[in-house]
Amino acid sequence: MSRFKALSKDHMGSALLIALGIGVLGLGVTYHIGNLNRMGAGFIPVVLGALLILVGLAIGLTAAPAGRETPSSGHGHGAAATGPEWRGWLCILGGVVSFVVLGQFGGLVPATFASVFISAMGDRQSTVKAAALLATIIDVFGVIIFHYGLSLQLPLFHWGW
Amino acid sequence: MYQSLMDLWYGFGIALQPSNFMWSVFGVLIGNLIGVLPGMGALTTISMLLPLTYVIAPVPAILMLAGIFYGSQYGGAIGAILLNLPSHPPHAVTCLDGYPMTKAGRGGAALGITMMASFFAASVGIIVMIFLSPLLVEIAFKFGPTEICSIMLLGLLAGATMSRGSPLKGVAMTVFGLLCGVVGTDVISGTTRYTFDLPELADGVELGALCMGLFGIADFLVSVNRTTVKPSDAKVSMKDMRPTRAEMKQAFWPMVRGTMVGTLFGAMPGTGPTITTFIAYALERKIAKDPSRFGKGAIEGVAAPEASAHSKTQVDFIPTLSLGIPGDAVMALILGALIIKGIQPGPQLITEHPDIFWGLVASFWIGNVLLVIMNVPMIGVWVRMLQVPYKFLYPAALFFICIGVYSTKNSLFDVGEVAVFGVLGAIFLSLDFPVSPIVLGFVLGPMLEENFRRAMLLSRGDLLVFLQRPISAWFIGACTLLILAQVWAYARKVRIAPPLQGAAELVSE
């Protein structure tokens, strides 16, 4: 994230939390708040929104300046950050979205194939052939297990609505 | 005492019923299998199989979930030791000495010791659970909404501050989780909150969708093209798994000490297993005659953390089931599954659902024996499974996540929720925020709100009631201590350059 070099991760997180808190607070006051004796639906959300803003402020104030922050400790999460992985993000989210869309308009078989194929393409090392093969294998297994085995309520093929 | 043994006997009767036993075996097997796969921890496994529990009866469902839990915990240790790849955060500590042992050709022995330590620790944890639970129930019956509120507060606070690096970030994520729990229809007034006029959100956010987004999709987003699984040339056969006599002797007391650490921490609500393993490891290094051996393949460094994780796991079920306060995200998931099945965790659980409680206790033992029996001959298979490349693994897992969430309510909207939480989780992870407190907050949120509002109704809006009732006052006192300790630690960190930096980083998530 070269554009944000001036800001450390903590500052960005703090800004995110404060924005979120303001949003929650803004919506929360539209519900009935009430008082401690007779609390309305909005009481707890307002308190939580305010807390989020406060914690966000505290994180922002105690944050280490950019460049001097402690290196991230994500062990299992591939710590070496080399900028955002647009291809990976696009394909993985595309996989989930294609499952939703094709589940609605196409049925189980195309939805499974598309979700596996598209998400598999997110890895730089995968080839179209390997991804298609993987998608086919999983499709077959998925249909056997979920359609015939667990009788999932999703038709195999289903055109239109 | 006698009563407990009778109850345990009854529990074995429940757990050995064919249908219950089958699901328990299934859970242990699947948990172990998926736990071995790189990048798949207990959380991913449980959230993937959560939908399955909706269609089976409550008793086998909880037995299966518990089986998945300790099965995957054990499976994770294999990846940690052989590949230096901790798929479940508590194993990060095991890597430190387990992987050097593999490089020195003693990986098999490390696995053998892990197995022994796990079994021993789990057995101790189960015994503690049997004899402590009835006592806790007596106290728990004195709990009203006020007490429940303050102990939940303590649990949330402990979960937020004692898990990973920055306690403030943990608190922020807990609050975010509480907010996710607010979404939906307010049970008291019937108002729909934060649903953005989407009718699908009126029932609230789906637990499975939240977890799979945060622990599945978010993890894929963060690790795709960044994790390179190095092929392991470790060849482990059954014969290698037998540690030498000297190694056994070396590992015995660390194993006992680790178990004690785990048991002690297990009874404390809100402390996750990661912090427990870290403390067990630190303790071993502190009392060792030659601390420099640690990190270079000291067998004590494998035995103690693994033992502590397993005893902690077992003992953790006590606060989860008898008070409804989960120790970590995995427990929160199991708690959520129970609530979905219509079983309210709390002091009355043991008396009202003795089949669940005692069946679970007995199944722990059966499951742990199964793990030992299964893992000795199957070790070769596990080693080969470790080689599955990530590029094949995550698309397959993604499909299981989609279909798992869909099958819960036959709702494609919920699958969309997964994507949203996946993005949120990935953003939080890349900003170094821990995501597990979100689940804790999400599961406890509605209960906390309900009890808080009830307590306030009873006390006519007087907040002082939390200090006037003695049990509640103790919990509030503990919360205050926890906050003060964090402030003190922060002040000290600012004053002197942190020498504990390396150590603190071990405690990831």
Image: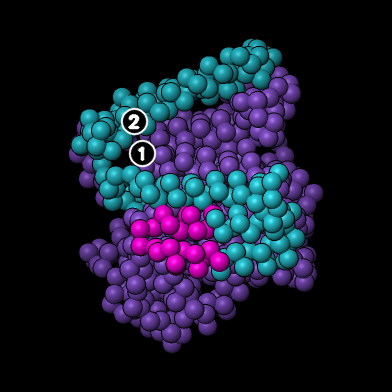
Chain colours: A cyan, B purple
* Position in image of residue A85 (x %, y %): 35, 47
Residue range in magenta is: A115-136
Q: Which residue is mark 2?
A: A12
* Position in image of residue A18 (x %, y %): 42, 23
- The answer to which of B133 and B114 lies nearer the viewer is B114
Residue at image location 71% in from the left, 44% down from the top:
A161
- Residue farthest to the top, as pictured: A35
- Residue farthest to the front, as pictured: A160
Amino acid type, residue under disc 1 in the picture: Leu
Looking at the rendered structure, whether the residues under marks 1 and 2 are on a common chain is answered as: no
Chain that bears disc 2: A
Query: Could one spot residue A159 in this view of the protein?
Result: yes
* Position in image of residue B427 (x %, y %): 41, 39
Q: Secondary structure at mark 2?
A: helix
Q: Which residue is mark 1?
A: B431
Quarter of the picture holding the N terminus of chain B: bottom right
